[in-house]
Amino acid sequence: MWNLLADVGGTHMRIAAASRAGDILDQKSFPSKGGAGFLSACEAMIAERKSTPATAVVAAAGVVTNGAVRLTNSDQSFSESDLARVCATADVSILNDFEAAAWSLVSVTDADTTCLQGPVDIPAGPRVIIGPGTGLGVGALIRAHDRPHVIAGEGGHISLSPRSADDLNYFEHLVRLWPDVRMGQGIAVEAEAVLSGTGLPVLYRAIAAVHKTSDDIRNAKQIFDAARAGTDEAAQIAVDLFRRYLGAMAGDLGLVYGASGGVFVTGGLAISNPWIFDQAFLDAFNAGGRHSHWRKQLPLYLYRNSDFGLIGARNYLASRWADDAGQRD
């Protein structure tokens, strides 16, 4: 007997076969765009294993509504009924990708992390996770009645407001280039417009327009590389904004959830660019006005394990089985 676990992001899909104990028996990766769709990839794994899974749990980068999801940054959609048909089992679940990411914090260890602030050994307590990748995800983990519980949401789409006169100018140009991300009548934008691989190139173009410099760079990786090398002024400014706004948002979330068990920063952009987690990032994280001292007490980690979606799907399934066993007892 095996279980199908999947993490379907805006760039990559990871699909795994796992044992009842949670051990990964087989794992494959596919592009989310331009290749076979997710359901076809599931069919291929089932055909290869010559059997259908007992259960299927999928972490998907999109809003999950009534058991169905459309990926936010990839032209794919599927539902639990689609998955049940392909897997020939009614025991299927679709989670938001950062709902699954929060579930991964059940089993996170210091081997998965780099400590940025606080103790190296991860303490108990509420935990929050934020991850800039193709999009921006947020989730939280708490414990109640001696069980882990995840608080899911769409924190990547909260609003960010400019924090300086220069930032105001950049945001004004950003909303001209991408009007859909404007929040209300002011100059606030949704967080994903700044803190994601989708938004960063648009922010870069806005900054280049302000400074009347070239905007030849077209993707987030090139922007980070140029900023680190010091070869492109707009890229350097864009990454500085990314660093400061990510730090501030992570600190805000830590304050909201009382994250004494840690604030965890992950996602493709964070994992690939650990050099941005410097004093400027920490200063933004800890800038809490009258509550700065409280923020400085929050443990803060870079979470380096890129399989957090699969780990979270596994932990969700294990928790559900534990709940079922407890009800039978």
Image: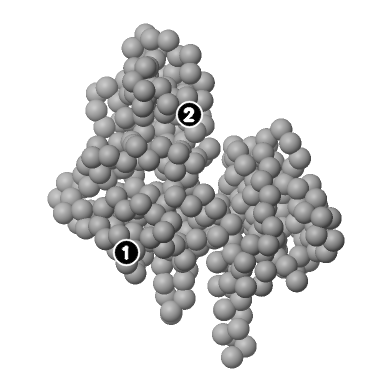
Question: What mark, if any, has residue 121 been given in the picture?
Answer: 1
Q: Residue at point 56% right, 85% down? A: 326
**As displayed, is residue 242 above or below residue 255?**
above
Q: Is mark 2 on a helix, strand or loop?
A: helix
Q: What residue type is labelled 2?
A: Ala
**As displayed, is residue 100 above or below residue 107?**
above
Q: Is mark 1 on a helix, strand or loop?
A: loop
Question: Is residue 221 toward the left or the right of residue 284 in the image?
Answer: right
In percent of width and height, residue 119 lies at: 26, 61
In percent of width and height, residue 264 lies at: 38, 53
Q: What residue is pinned by disc 2? A: 220
State whether residue 258 appears in this view: no
Badge 2 local density, few (<14 within 10 Å), some, or many (20+)? many
Number of numbered discs on residues: 2
- Disc on the earlier residue, 2 or 1: 1
Question: Is residue 114 toward the left or the right of residue 196 in the image?
Answer: left
In percent of width and height, residue 37 lies at: 74, 42
Badge 1 local density, few (<14 within 10 Å), some, or many (20+)? few
* Real-space Cα separation, disc 2 to disc 1, in angstroms: 32 Å
- Residue contact at pointers 2 and 1, CB within 8 angstroms: no
For this rendering, which residue is in front, 201 or 288? Answer: 201
**As displayed, is residue 123 above or below residue 32?**
below
Question: Is residue 78 toward the left or the right of residue 291 in the image?
Answer: right
Q: Which amino acid does label 1 sit on?
A: Asp
